Image: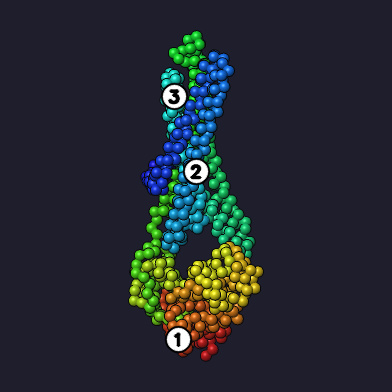
Amino acid sequence: MHLAADPSRRDGSENAWKALVRLVAPYGRRLAWVAFAIAVASGVAQFAPQFVRYVFDVVIPAGEARLFLWTGLAIVAFHLVSEGLKYVSMLASFAFTQDVVNETRRQAYGRLLSLPLDRFVRERSGSLVSRVVNDVNALEAMLQAGATRIVGHAVSIVVVLIILFAMEWRLALVAIAIVALMGWFTVRYQEPLRRLARRIRGRVGDMTAVAGEAIQNVAVVKSFTAEGTEWDRFRTQSDDYRDLNLARRVEVGKMQAAIGLTSELGVAALVLGGGWLLVQAGGEAGGLTIGVLTAFVLYLNNLINPVRFVLNFNNQLQAGVAALERIDALMTETPEPYEDGRPFAPGDLEIVGVRFAYPGANEPALDGLDLSVPQGTTAALVGPSGAGKSTVTKLIARLYEPDAGTIRVGGAPLGEVSLETLRRAVAVVPQEPTLFSGSVAENVRYGRPDATEAEVREALRLANAEGFVRRLPDGFDTEIGERGVKLSGGQKQRIAIARALLKGAEILLLDEATSSLDSESEALIQDALEGVLGRGRLTTLVIAHRLSTIQDADRIFVLEEGRTTESGRHAELLAHGGTYADLYALQAGEGRPEARA
C-alpha cells in the first residue's frame, strides 16, 4: 500500500505536529530565548569572511605592520565573542531539549500505566515500552537537531543571502539557484523516507517485544530447549530491521549524493563565473575584487552547509514524526477513570448475573454468575480449570469491567466507586506472584511505602516468611533480583502474601495463593491467615485447587462454565454429593462416590 495515499497516515502526521506543539507550548518563553540566542550566535558568525575580504583588499595592499596587528587582534576578539555565543546557545538548546524530552517520557510512561488492562492485551509489552523509550529517543534527536540548531542555520541562510546580494547580486543569483536545486532534491525524497521511517519505528517495537518476552520467560525457554526458536524469532525481526535501515540508507544516500553534487558543482560555477567577470574587467568588475570573490566562496560554503543541514534534517525529521505519531497515539488513549466516583465503603460483596468475556474470546469466562459474601467472612471458589474463578478476582479489582450484571460492595455498584479507593481497599495474591527488583522489605512495603519496620516484620511473620528472610545474606535488606529470581517459588509466594497483608485491605483475594508451598508451610500460613481473617472486618475470597485448604470457609461456591452450580459449607456440600463431593473424593484418592458404592 502506498502510504502517501492513505488519509489515516496524513492524519497521523498532522496529529504528530499538533502533539509537538502541545509538548513545547509550556516552554514558549524559553524556546523564544533559545531561538534568540542561537540566532544571535549564528548571525554574528557570518561576519567572519569579511575579515578575509578586508585582509585581501585592504591590509595586504597597504603593507603596514600596525594594520596587520590590529586586524589580528580584531579577528581574535571576534572569534572569542562568536564562540562564546555559540557555547551559551548550545547549552541553552541542549537543556531545553532535555527538559521537553524528559517531560514527554514521564507523561508517556504515566499514560501507559493509566491505561486499562485490556489495552495491554492488544499490544505486547515490549512494543509498548518501545514507545516510551525508543520513540522518545527518536523525538529527542529530532528536537535537538531541529527545534534548536535549525533555527541557527535558518538565520545563517538569511544573513548570508543578504550579505551576498550586498556584495555581488549576479553571483548571489547563482547561489540561490544552487540552493533551490538542493531543495528540489530534498522534496523528491521526502515521501520514501517518511514511509520507511514509519516502518522502522514499528519494527523497533516488534524487536523489543520479541526480546523482552524471551528474557522475561527465560526459565520456560530453557526448560523447553527453545533457545534456537527464540533466536530465530529475534533474528527475523532484526533482519527486517536491518533491511529497512539499508533501504532507508539507500534513499538518504541518493538524496545526499544529489545535494552534494549540486553544491560542489555550484562552488565551481561560482569560482569560474566570478573569475571570468574579473578577467573581463581587468581585475575589478563593478566592485567585485579578489577579496570579495574569496569572501564570496567562503560565504557560499557558509550558505551551503546550513542548507545541507536543513535538507538532511529531513531524514531525522521523518524519523521524529514517525515516533511522534506513535507517542501521540499512546498519549491520546483514554485512561482509566482513576479518581472518578464515590469513595469505597466496606460492606457485603454481591455478584449478580455477571457475564464477561475476555477481549477476542469466543466463549464467555463468566456466564450469569451469582454469589454473595457477607462482610468479614471467608468464601471459597472451587471448580475445574477454566470455570472462571480467577476472572472473578479481576472483576472485583476492576481490572476488567463486566459485560453484563452487577458487582456491589456495601450496596454500591463497583462501577460507581473510584478506582483509587477501590484498589487501595483490595489486596490480591495471585497464583504466580510478581516481585520487583529491590530488597525484601521494599517488596513487602510495595503497597504501603510508609510502613514501619515492625509492621513489615509482623506481615512477614503472619506469612510464615520471617524465618527464611532472617537466614538471607542481608536479612530484610537482601536484594532479591529482577522478578525475585533469587528466591524459590514458595518464598516468593510468602513475600507476596506478606505484601498483601501489610496493605491493610478491606477485601483480600487469594488466587491459589498457597499452591507453591509445601504442606508444612501451607499449614502454618493457613493458621496465620485464620487469625487475620477472624478479625471480623476483612472479607476474603479464596480460590483453591486443594480443597483441604478451604474446609473452614464460611461458604464455598462451586463454579462450572462461568456460573455457580453449588454453594454451602464443606460438610453440606459433601452431604449433597454433587461436583464438590466428587472433587473432594478424587483429591482424597478415593475415586468417585458412585465407584465406592
Instruction: Give coordinates of residue 288: x percent, y percent.
Output: 47, 15
Q: Residues within 10 Å of mark 2 (few under 14, many from 20)?
A: some
Q: Amino acid at mark 1?
A: Arg
Q: Whole-Å distance between the Cαs marked 1 and 3?
A: 95 Å
Q: Nearer the viewer, mark 1 or mark 2?
A: 2
Q: Where is mark 2, residue-wise?
A: 94
Are the residues tagged 3 and 2 within 8 Å (C-beta)? no
**Count of numbered circles in the view:** 3
Nearer-N-terminus badge (1/3): 3
Nearer-N-terminus badge (3/2): 2
Q: Where is mark 3, residue-wise?
A: 163
Label 1 element class? loop
Q: Note whether 210 is above or below 42 in the view shown.
A: below
Instruction: Give coordinates of residue 67: x percent, y percent.
Output: 54, 19
Q: Outermost residue toward the front? A: 66
Q: Amino acid at mark 2?
A: Phe
Q: Residues within 10 Å of mark 3 (few under 14, many from 20)?
A: some
Q: Which residue lies at the image location 61% right of the left edge and 76% below the top edge? A: 467
Q: Which residue lies at the image location 53% right of the left edge and 87% below the top edge? A: 595
Q: Where is mark 1, residue-wise?
A: 569
Q: Which residue lies at the image location 59% right of the left edge and 79% below the top edge? A: 521
Q: Note whether 588 is above or below 438 in the view shown.
A: below
Nearer-N-terminus badge (1/2): 2
Task: Please state if 250 lies on the left or on the right of 565 as rendered.
Answer: right
Label 2 element class? helix
Instruction: Give coordinates of residue 445: x percent, y percent.
Output: 52, 69
